[in-house]
Amino acid sequence: MTLRLLASVAAVVLAFCGSAQPQSYPARDIRVVVGLPAGSGGDVVARYYADKLSQLAGKPVIVENRPGMILSAGADAVAKAPPDGYTILITSVTSSHAANLFNFKKLPYDPIKDFAPVATLQRSYFILVVRADAPWKSVAELTAAMKEKGAKATYAYGSPPALASAELYKARIGLQAVGVPYKTAMASLPEMFRGELDFQFIDATQGTPLIQGGKLRGLAVTAGRQIPGANLPTMAEAAGIPEFDIAPTWGVLLPAGAPPAIVARLESWFGEIVRMDATRQFLARTHGAPFPGGAKDLADFIPKEIKKWQELSRLAKIVPQ
């Protein structure tokens, strides 16, 4: 009888704790992990959403930068964290959960099984740029010059979308330019400005101020349709590559096994953030586009993005490292 009574009490206590945890969430600071260095375009994105989350949750939200493996180091840290809702991943799922499957021979996590999707946030795009004093003023002029340079032509890349954009451009046009990897696009700028690199695809968040400041010249955008305010043609138009449509999508994920009630609460909060006027203004400044969606939307999106990047990687002839 005593053993049965103790077992019954334990079951009630466990049930109470399990239900109380989501109700009291968050009871302490929340940690947002971003797989890029502080000051990068992705870091700006993560810090914006972390700040708004803090306002809604009523608790401090601390951003932790875990750069490495082109966003995958951050994703791995979250995949291995306790699934209690206090460690959140804000990431370009296009990179960490789709493209990196084909950029690396093996990821330290499963992009489907090791995460609980929460919400989609926004889409962005990249800009094909050259230095401001380069003689090339269009994609056609750059293409002709790069064909003439052959294997002496060079480009920089600091993320999977940047690499895929360059390799797709090369494969479809028939260029031999050699890629030079950097931790971030910003790290490549000294070489760009000195003329040691010919071109690169740079995140619009980082590239637009440099273009407006006269440091770089923008030639085309990677999105498959015209971007309001960009005043640049698409790569599909300018390079004559109809399938060129690379627009990284950002989302929010928790470690697999996170309580459904906590997933639902975060889903609601991030949905509210995406709909804010402040977010619309932020996206206008950083050249992103809202991409609202809940947990199911993100869960459905990731496999489709993986399939898309499998084909992109094949077209671009990307060799896993």
Image: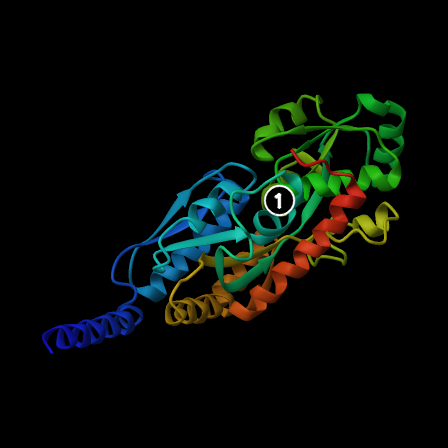
Q: Position of residue 176 (x, y in %)?
A: 83, 29
User: Relative to residue 220, is residue 296 drawn left or right?
Assistant: left
Residue that extends furthest to the left in the rendered view of this protein: 2
Viewer-nearest residue: 47 or 103: 103
Q: Is residue 166 above or below residue 247?
A: above
Viewer-nearest residue: 40 or 210: 40
Q: Residue at x 78, y 45 (%)?
A: 314
User: Relative to residue 177, is residue 7 drawn left or right?
Assistant: left
Q: Is residue 294 visible?
A: no
| Residue tagged 1 | 100
Instruction: Find numbered disc 1 in the image and state the secondary structure of the residue it sits on.
Output: helix
Could you tell me the amino acid type at mark 1?
A: Asn
Q: Quadrant of residue 257?
A: bottom left
Q: Is residue 14 above or below residue 217?
A: below
Q: Residue at x 55, y 53 (%)?
A: 111
User: Relative to residue 145, is residue 79 drawn left or right?
Assistant: left
Q: Residue at x 36, y 60 (%)?
A: 85
Q: Is residue 41 above or below residue 90?
A: above
